[in-house]
Image (cartoon, rainbow, N blue to C red):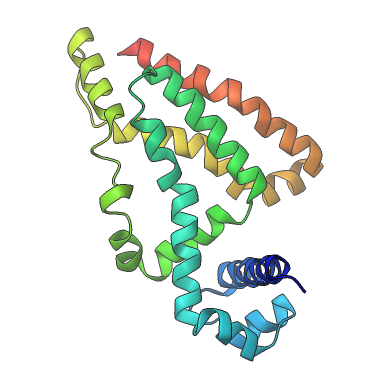
Amino acid sequence: MSKQSAIERNESTEQKIKEAARKVFTEKGFAATRTRDIAEASGYNLALINYYFRSKENLFNIIMLESLQLFVGSIIPILNDRDTTLQQKVEVLVAHYIDMMIANPNIPFFVMNAVNTNPQEFLSKMTGDNALDKTYLEEQWQELIRKKKALAFNPMHLFINMIGMTVFPFVAAPMIKARNKISNDIYVQMMQERKQLIPMWVKSMFETI
């Protein structure tokens, strides 16, 4: 086996273990998950999991950081883009989250589970480069408030509304699909439609201030 093939095999093994671990952590929570559970879900033995990740705690932290990067860290460049308007940022942000969650449907469940399991640990990783309160979007929001002489309120409300309209349909997907007898393909199509709908709804918020 070539060196390149060995590297690709190692990366594939690590990824499969992490995907299995994320699913188990999401279903059981950190405390109730055993390394043996991850081994059974991934199809790899305990020795191999310990070889790659050393401990359950280390594996969980790696997955948490990767999930944070997908869920929060990846949007910082969007919010800091000085060449886009507020409305354009909303459009890009919504499309980014919808595409990300279609590709990684377990991410919002894992993040919520991690927050509930150990909120302090989660918050400690939300500082620094992942901070949302020092982005260019906030400057743009304050400028909008000044121009329109409107009642000032924290731009976090805008972010929360966008996240709620974007993320909740994925969190509630099993219930919505079962209750309304919607196939997964149709539901994904509906989520794609929200790329146009959510920015329209958010724009109406801009126009009322």
Quadrant housing the C terminus: top left
Residue 15 x %, y %:
64, 66
User: Which of these two is toward me, 33 or 67?
Assistant: 67
Residue 122 x %, y %:
35, 63
Residue 54 x %, y %:
50, 84
Quadrant housing the N terminus: bottom right
Residue 139 seen by the camera = yes
Q: Which residue appears farthest toward the bottom when viewing the image?
A: 47
Q: Image point 64% across, 83% down: which residue?
A: 37
Q: Image point 56% across, 79% down: which residue?
A: 52
43 vs 14, left or right, is: right
**Figure label count:** 0
Residue 7: quadrant of the picture = bottom right
Residue 139 x %, y %:
23, 25
Q: Image point 31% across, 59% down: which residue?
A: 123
Q: Which residue appears farthest toward the front when viewing the image?
A: 2
Q: Image point 42% across, 47% down: which residue?
A: 72
User: Which of these two is toward me, 32 or 125?
Assistant: 125
Residue 182 seen by the camera = no
Relative to 36, is 30 above or below?
above
User: Which of these two is toward me, 105 or 79?
Assistant: 79
91 vs 184, left or right, is: left
Relative to 144, is 126 above or below?
below
User: Which of these two is toward me, 9 or 3?
Assistant: 3
